[in-house]
Image (cartoon, rainbow, N blue to C red):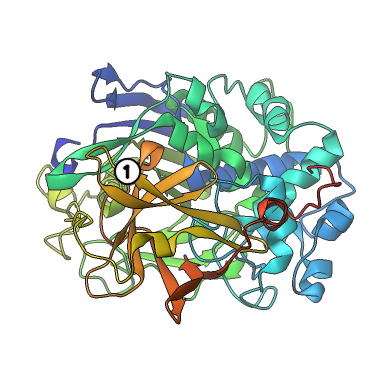
Amino acid sequence: MACRNVPGMFLAIVKDDKVVLSEGYGFKNVDTNEAFTSQTPMSIQSTSKFMFTILVARMLTKYPKYTFDTTVKELLGDHLELSDKIAEEMLTIRDCVSMAHGLRFPTTTLIENWYATTKYDRIRNTKHYPVVDELRRGFHYSSDGFLFLDKAFEILENKTIEQILRDELFEPLGMVHSNTIGEARDDESYATGYQPGPNGTLLKTTRNFISRSGSNVGGFGLASTADDLAKYLRFVLREGKLEDGTQHVNPDLIKEVLSPQIFYPLPYNGVADGYSLRPDFPTTSQTLSYGMASWHRYYRGFQLVQHTGSHGGCDTLMTYVPDLKIGIYTGLNGPYTDVSWVAETVIQEYILDVLLELPNYLNDTTACTFPAPWGEPVGLPSYQAIPEDVAPALPLDKYTGVFGKEGFGCVSMTLNRTEDDVEVLQFAIGWGRMFAYPKEGRAHQFWLKGVDDMFHYWYIGGYSAAFIESDGLITEMIVSGSTLKRMPDDNKQLCSFYLTGLNSTENEK
């Protein structure tokens, strides 16, 4: 941990229906030196997708008239509107969890945003965005499909998805410390996430920031602990049986969840998959397909079912070896970026070699240098701070105003002052607030520097915005690939419609 600058982590290992290890290491909070324990909850981010897919299998067991090939339209009716009407009628549960849907909101998390929208807003607004591919034509990673299933289950059960998770998964499995990350802002037991700061330091991510990303519960909104995840690993490897022997999920559905679904044509070129069929490394590893919320990879000839999760300084890696009844779950609360990925790869592959009784190619030295000496080393990125002294092409007040787009909402650009009493252009959408600083040599382009709960966005290369100027007037704004038009002064009602998709007389949901 020390050589990778990891503040804290959890580790759960299961083999042959026994918990080999469930433990926390290091610190959940560096400032207070609070220990990371086996009962410390942490955001598990995109590994939520697989856990939610297990919930899907439970719901299909409970409602056997439905299958993975049931259309989402059958479940949601008029609540589902896509820009591609053929896809709207044909989209299935299987398509949603196997990334074969061809759907995607605009490119970054600022648009798939929790800064202003609710999950219901995003479901309504899906119709405004073109599909990126034909249905089932290829793999397109996205969390969007989980929003549809979330709402479908709420309709079926007449409960919130949070209550459904507790009733159908957490309580039956005895996962007493698991919940949604929306609860993180009020729970001091959560692990603090850490991201790279200036000069090799680590910056903490606030619990409030983490909790804001919890609205897409199935996509990236769950939290758990080592102890709870050990129970969950055993449950999946027991093919859906509870401790008392009750078949809580149809075993055929569990087998289906663990099966490959779609060819994955371009295996990761990153550190964890850079050693494939003719390796420079001492081992072989190749990702060949995507299953239901999982990558299907072969390590030393053994099939692994895996998924990663990463956001806000929290990184997780889930691994099943179904044929050998092995399950491993790791979670790190820093340092984020590829360093965390490398650390989890090292930990899990060392454990796999031990459990598989294979010669281990990692030792005290190579565990800290991996992927070197076989590949290029990976270290903390050297981020450059956003310069704050570049002059804008126009006076700052020329960039002020409200800019909006249907299906997106509105961005407010205003003048503010920094703590040093310097005038600055401020970007705001929902609760998210950032200061905009001109880019060197690029007229009307700005870096966005986070403030308040977004202060960890301090560097060049994160968020940015650009403006379109015509005859000395700013007419449009471009942010995260979307073009927003300048809104009229009387814009409150129109901005609300752009954000929620609701007229003033319509109800939320």
Picture coordinates of residue 65, whole percent (x, y) = 90, 48
Locate residue 147 relative to residue 404 in the image: left or right. right
Picture coordinates of residue 217, whole percent (x, y) = 61, 41
Whether residue 253 is visible here, answered yes or no, is no
Q: Is residue 96 above or below residue 416?
A: below
Number of numbered discs present? 1
Say which of 368 and 440 sits in front: 440
- Look at 74% across and 26% down and name the residue there: 246
Locate residue 499 relative to residue 264 in the image: left or right. right
The quarter holding residue 193 reads top left
- Look at 15% across and 36% down and name the residue there: 2
The quarter holding residue 330 reads top left
Q: In this view, does 242 lie above or below 112?
A: above
Picture coordinates of residue 215, whole percent (x, y) = 60, 41
Query: What is the crowding at mark 1: few (fewer than 14 residues within 10 Å), some, or many (at least 20)?
Result: few
Q: In which quarter of the image is the N terminus?
A: top left
Q: In which quarter of the image is the C terminus?
A: top right
Q: What element carries label 1?
A: strand
Picture coordinates of residue 388, whole percent (x, y) = 21, 55
The residue sitting at the bottom extreme is 471
Q: Which amino acid does label 1 sit on?
A: Arg
- Look at 45% across and 59% down and name the residue there: 400
Which residue is under mark 1? Answer: 417
